[in-house]
Image (cartoon, rainbow, N blue to C red):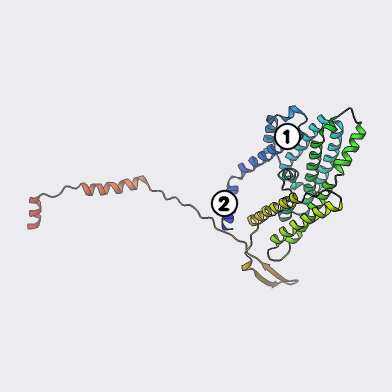
Amino acid sequence: MKTLLEYREKMKLFLGKYDIYIFPVLKFALALITFLVINANVGFMPRLTNPGIALVLALMCSFLPLNMTAVFGALLILVHMYSLSLEAFAITFVLFALMFLLFFRTAPKYGYLLIVTPLAFGLRIPYVIPLAMGLVATPVAAVPAACGTVVYFLLHYIHLNTAILGNTETSTMAEKITYLLDNAVNNKEMLLTVAAFSLTLIIVYVIRRMSVDYSWTIAVVVGTVTDIVVLLFGSLALDISPRIAGVLVGSLISAGLALILQVSIFSLDYSRTEYVQFEDDEYYYYVKAVPKITIAVPEKTVKKISPQKKTAAVRKKEKQGRRPAARPAERQDRQNR
């Protein structure tokens, strides 16, 4: 615990000192990973799968607002969908247009969730998104988290059914559009995941705002249990084959990451809780004050020894050591005097 808090304070000092360089590098890394993942999963246009193009786009995104990374990622996906089939392009375009209109209208400052949520699905820990955002954000973050979930399921479905969607001989345009709407947009598993994530995020937010001891820890535990229950029982109710092992393991790992996040940004010392009462002309106040746990980072002091002072001292000792010894006659004269 103490070590983690020390690392937190050191990280704050480091970010405060070098943030002008760190944040562009982080945006570049996130954009590069996003574009490479898109090309690896839906790279239907071979010319765009060149890593150099992803590198150039990531360099551009490093100097632009983070939401532009999501916009460039959406444009890259649309170009690949057009190369696959006109039907896939049309469905994806309409879906992206609706999502971006809803996102920019409700929660534009959480644009990174459009990128991070599909990546979390790829890492098999998507359940950390509602837990983390319930701790550090507001309920409107459920909108971009839901949009990111829809993007993942859409791309995952198209990736698994590339042969069917790209075949121009066996089915007409209307059949392909109906097929996409029935299986990609009206996906029961996707709708269940969106509902579970939204409910979990709201519950975590409400509990961590309560004035009770260890509210953030309680919020993480209750949110994890809620997510597991909704996903498992919802799968049974909607006749979806539940992935029990994946849900349980992913939820536990996500809960651990959320607890680490809680300790990193919000650690309180409940043993020193104080209750204060005061009044003004209109109200009487009851205030509960819980101090934060703070640790002073030990500062390293380097003591510099001046070469000139050292040389002078050495020279003085050397002069005293080199003084010639008195002769016997001189010693006798000194004694007689």
Quadrant of the rendering where the N terminus is positioned: bottom right
Say which of 101 and 221 sits in front.
221
Examine the rendering and report whether any part of residue 254 can be seen: yes
The residue at 41%/48% (across/down) is 304
Question: What amino acid is at disc 1?
Answer: Ala
| Mark identifier at residue 40 | 1
- Where does residue 84 sit, x and y in percent of width and height? 82, 30
- Where does residue 97 sit, x and y in percent of width and height? 84, 40
- Where does residue 206 sit, x and y in percent of width and height? 76, 60
Whole-number angstrom distance, CA of label 2 to CA of label 1: 37 Å
Which of the two discs, 2 and 1, sits closer to the camera? 1
Of the numbered discs 2 and 1, the one sitting upstream in the chain is 2
Q: Secondary structure at mark 2?
A: helix
Is 183 located above or below residue 337 in the figure?
above
Q: Secondary structure at mark 1?
A: helix
Say which of 172 and 31 sits in front.
172
For label 2, the crowd category at 10 Å Cα-Cα, with few meaning under 14, some 14 to 19 and many 20 or more, is: some
On the picture, is 293 further left or further right than 168?
left
Residue 260 position by quadrant: bottom right
| Mark identifier at residue 10 | 2
Is 60 located above or below residue 259 in the figure?
above
